[in-house]
Amino acid sequence: MSTNNILVFAEQRDGRILAASYQLLALATQLASETGGQAEACVIGSGVGDLSTKLAAYGAKKVYTVDDAELAMYRAAPYATALAAAIDTADPKIVLVPTSFMGKDLAPRVAAKKRAALAIDATDVKLDGGDVVVEKPMYAGKFSGTFKLSANRLQVVTVRTNAYSANDPHEGEAAETQAVTVSLSDNDKRVKINEIVATGSGVKDVTEADIVVSGGRSLKSEDNFKILYNMAEVLGGAVGASRAACDAGYQPHTRQVGLTGKVVTPKLYIACGIDGAIQHLAGMRGSKVIVAINTKKAAPIFKVATYGCVCDLFALVPPLTEELRKANG
C-alpha cells in the first residue's frame, strides 16, 4: 500500500539543482494538500548530501539521497536503478520528473521497472479522486490531449519546465534526510564515460533559461548573432536559433529551438528575424510572453506573438539592448 506522498526527482548537475525541480516541488506541495501526504524529493549523484537544505527551502519535507561515486555523471541504467531504489524506499503515490533531456530518458525506464503508469511532457497535472489527470500538447502544439493515469498503480509524470512557478524559498527550513543505498549490477555499469566535452559559449542552455533571445536566417551570419548574445547577456537569458539558422551554420544545433530541436517554455521569448515555421512555433509557443521582431507583416510568428514589431532587427535590437543595459544600471 503506497503512501499519499508526492516524490520529486530533483535533477542536479555538478551540484546545482535544476530550476525545474523547484517548480515541481511547488506542484508536489499542491497535490500533497489534496492527497493528505507531503512533498518529498530524491536527489541522485556523488556528494549530493548537502543539497537537501536547498530542497527543504522550496518545500521538500523529506529528502532521499542516493549518493555513490558511480552516479557522479548521468548514465541511464545506474540512474534508473537508483531512482527505482528511492521509490521502493519512499513508496510514493506519484513521482514527478522534469521534462529535461535527462528526465525524458530516465522516466520511461523507471516506469518500466516499476510497472507504473506514465505521462510525458505534461503542462497541467490535477487529481480526480485517486487518479492523476494530465494535459499535454500534441501534434506540434496544435491540440491538447487529456489523459488519466489509474490510481491502481504508481503514477510517473514528467512536467514541462515553467508550466508551474516555484514557491518563494524559505531559508532555514529543514527536511528529514534519508540515505538510500543502491547495489549497481555489472549490467548497470556497462556504459563508461571516458570524456566530457564542453560545448557552447558559456551562455545558458535554452531549456533552462527564463528568457530566450532567438534568431533566424535573417541574421545572415554567425558574426551577426553577437547582437543577440549581447541582449541575452543583459537580460540574463539564453540564445536560441531557428532550424534555418542552424542549418546555415550560424549557430550550433544545440541552440536550435523547435520540434526537431529543443522545446522551450521561458517567461519571455524574443524572436528576431524568425518567420515562424510550424516546427519552430511548436517548440516555443508555450512561452509566457512572446515578442516578435520581423520585417514581414504576414509572418506566422505574429499570430502567436504577445507583442509584434514590424521592423529591421538590426535597427531595433542594438539600441534596445543599450536601453536595457541603462535600465539595469
Image (cartoon, rainbow, N blue to C red):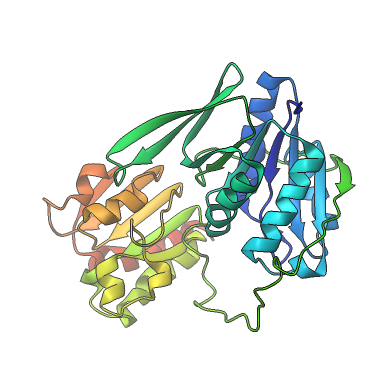
Residue 116 as seen in the image, left or right of residue 42 = left
Residue at image point 59% right, 54% down: 106
Picture quadrant of residue 320: bottom left
Image-based side of 43 in relation to 130, left or right: right
Q: Is residue 259 above or below residue 60?
A: below
Residue 60, image x, y percentages = 76, 39
Q: In the image, what residue occupies the spot 84% across and 56% down?
A: 50
Residue 57 visible: no
Q: Nearer the viewer, residue 33 or 240?
A: 33
Q: Residue furthest top?
A: 129
Q: Nearer the viewer, residue 314 or 15?
A: 15
- 227 over 257 or under it: above or below: below
Residue 310 occupies quadrant: bottom left
Compared across the picture, whether 55 is left or right of 282 comes to: right
**Percent x, y of residue 78:** 70, 62
Q: Is residue 272 left or right of residue 1?
A: left
For the point 50% across and 64% down, the residue is 205
Quadrant (top left/top right/bottom left/bottom right) for the N terminus: top right
Is residue 260 something that shows in the picture? yes
Q: Residue 141 in the image: x percent, y percent?
A: 31, 43
124 and 66: which one is in front? 66
Q: Quadrant of the C terminus?
A: bottom right
Q: Residue at x 77, y 69 (%)?
A: 70
Residue 137: image x %, image y %? 37, 40
Label total for image: 0
